[in-house]
Amino acid sequence: MGNAFTVVFGGLLAFFVITVLLLGLFSKRSARDYLDWKPTRSPEAETQNEIDDVAQMIAAQNELKRRRGAPEISEEEIEARVREDREQQRRWRES
């Protein structure tokens, strides 16, 4: 009795999974159409948010450095460090 129950419900589960996969495979609409998904912000707004985030992070770092008496850091110095780190990683990969 228990074995028949397992077979029937296992078969139903497999049927539904296969059906859903086939519907997705042969559907003419994209998932974006079904979900009616649209970006919440424009790429320009995202770029501006990133720029603002970087400025805020640098300001916060400089505030901590001022409290410790350490020299402040500029965006140009951070960019130079990033370039150096990327160059070093490239050299490591090539060796």
Image: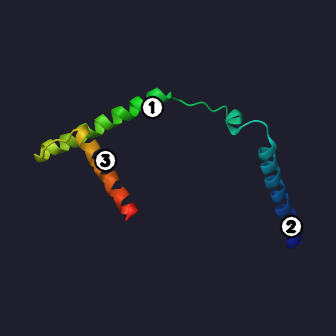
Tag in front: 3 or 2: 3
Nearer-the-camera pick, 77 or 9: 77
Q: Residue at x 81, y 54 (%)?
A: 18
In the picture, measured across the screen, residue 74 lies left or right of residue 68, that is right
Q: Amino acid at mark 1?
A: Glu
SS class of the residue under badge 1? helix
In the picture, measured across the screen, residue 93 lies left or right of residue 68, that is right
Dividing the image into 4 quarters, which one contains the N terminus? bottom right
Q: Residue at x 21, y 38 (%)?
A: 74
Q: Which residue is mark 1?
A: 46
Q: Residue at x 33, y 53 (%)?
A: 87
Q: Which residue is mark 3?
A: 83
Q: Is residue 87 above or below residue 57?
A: below
Q: Amino acid at mark 2?
A: Val
Q: Which residue is mark 2?
A: 7
Q: Which mark is residue 27?
A: none
Disc on the earlier residue, 1 or 3:
1
Tag in front: 2 or 1: 1
